[in-house]
Image (cartoon, grey):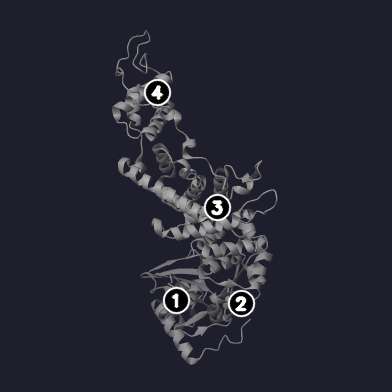
Amino acid sequence: MPVPDSHDLTPEQSRAAAALLRQIAAPVAGLARQFTRQGHELALVGGSVRDVFLGRGHGDLDLTTDARPEQVLKLAEGWADAVWEIGIGFGTVGLRKGSIICEITTYRSESYRYDSRKPKVDYGTSLIDDLSRRDFTVNAMAARLPSLELADPFGGLADLRHRVLRTPGRPQDSFTDDPLRILRAARFTAQLDFTATAGVREAMTALAPRLAVVSAERIRDELTKLMLAPGNGPVRGIELLVDTGVADQVLPEIPRLRLEVDEHFRHKDVYQHSLTVLEQAIALEARYGLEADLRLRLAALLHDIGKPKTRRLLPDGRVAFHHHEVVGASMARARLSQLRFPKDVVNDVAALVGLHLRFHGYNEGGWTDSAVRRYVRDAGPLLTRLHALTRADCTTRNRQKAARLAHAYDDLEERIAFLAEQEELEKIRPDLDGNQIMEILGVRPGPVVGKAYQYLLELRMEQGPLGTERAAQALRRWAEAEGLSIGGATASGRPPGGGPPSDRSAGGEDPAGGGAEGAGPAEDGPASSS
């Protein structure tokens, strides 16, 4: 309901508000005059108005009108350079004029039937009624065009000043009409650094199960906006989702990290640790040339979600989470797929979760060059993000330990840079390609070529560049050990009846000596259970 001071702007304040709104409204002034000449209303509304008063940059313009969608189409003729009707079933018409994009929505209300994912739309005739059905008071302000008169019937300006998130009516009614508003509350908390009122929080908790009627795509879009909020916003947003129980509906793996501390399972709070890793990952983005990186942020939030399933009590009373990175990668893939995130995002986040422990153990004894090469190869294009995630995962309060880990990772990055300069690590390939392998072995395309390629790749990782001749010798030795016959002779060139090898240098060093047989993940250091 309207608040007592909602219309108490002084004439000077009204003029100041109009001056702020004039610049944003200028591109649609001509369209507003066309609506007025035809007896219709047009107003800037929602985020477009809110952001003017917050001093935030704005994107597309949101407008509202009493004209029906088919009337909007006619009124836009001769003004708009392009028109699209993708949202016309919900009362929205999209327009473009030069570089300006705007959406015009007929006064309306939306409500979901209890078991339906498609909202029911009813058109209205009153701007104030339209504002009363908006999600929050800070979005329930409008600037009438072309006069720029501010309509603020529910105290949105006051709530902006106090950074409060409140609904125009009862929050229970608002969230029942559109359950997605529950997630929007968390998103605005993250984006705008607002505080939800107690009533809003209570309604979020009570009505969280209603999110079951909202499509995964709409939920994904709100979570994405929340995770890409500036500063420490994503942490605030996730905390609100968890504290209100909403996360149980959309990201249940996160509240499950709040493991109780008891006499049987002594360990740090994994939930708080994950929020700290998310905060630190965001802070590290600039260092690594990343900006609001969704993949890194999701990986930071989800990197330990495998711990509850892998928690084990060791004989000495300590708690271990062996292979939680493997389990967590699978869980992250499943959750993000269910939320309809793009496949490349799902794959990258799962890969980062699976790799986040690879560094542990490096400072206890270092890695061989081959282990460093594998680290780079396995990370591939995600290496920069893995650097940021690994550093962010250090949340110890022990300053000496933190400094030791930071120094160790500095050393690893220096070694990667050194090897990269020498060997182009990102482009590591065997010294022989598939065609050369087939020519040397005298075989046609098939599984043997793949096995030979993999052997040479492991050899390359172990020993660095070999060159074509040494790699060919190693390939023949591998084929001999595999018992492969080539053109009636063994792979070494020795005829079936015996005799010296045909193209093996006497007394030459075996380039594969020790080679790949000694290689493996164990060189990368022990997996940490922390």
Q: Would you say the residues marked 3 and 4 are in contact, meaning their CB atoms lie under 8 Å apart?
A: no
Residue at the image point whose x is 65% and y is 42% from the top? 314
The image quarter containing residue 326 is top right
Q: Position of residue 13 (x, y in %)?
A: 48, 88
Closer to viewer: mark 2 or mark 3: 3
Report the side of 521 relative to 369 (left or right).
right
User: According to the image, label 2 marks what residue?
Assistant: 168
Secondary structure of residue under mark 1:
loop
Q: CA gap, disc 3 to disc 4?
A: 42 Å
Residue 55: image tag: 1
Callout 2 amino acid: Pro
> Along the polypeptide, which appears first: circle 2 or circle 4?
2
> Along the polypeptide, which appears first: circle 3 or circle 4?
3
Return the residue nearer the eye: 63 or 202.
202
Residue situated furthest right in the rendering: 263
> Along the polypeptide, which appears first: circle 4 or circle 1?
1
Q: CA gap, disc 3 to disc 1?
A: 33 Å
Callout 4 amino acid: Trp
User: According to the image, label 4 marks what residue?
Assistant: 478
Up the image or down, 263 lies above or below 442; here it is: below
Residue 302: image tag: 3
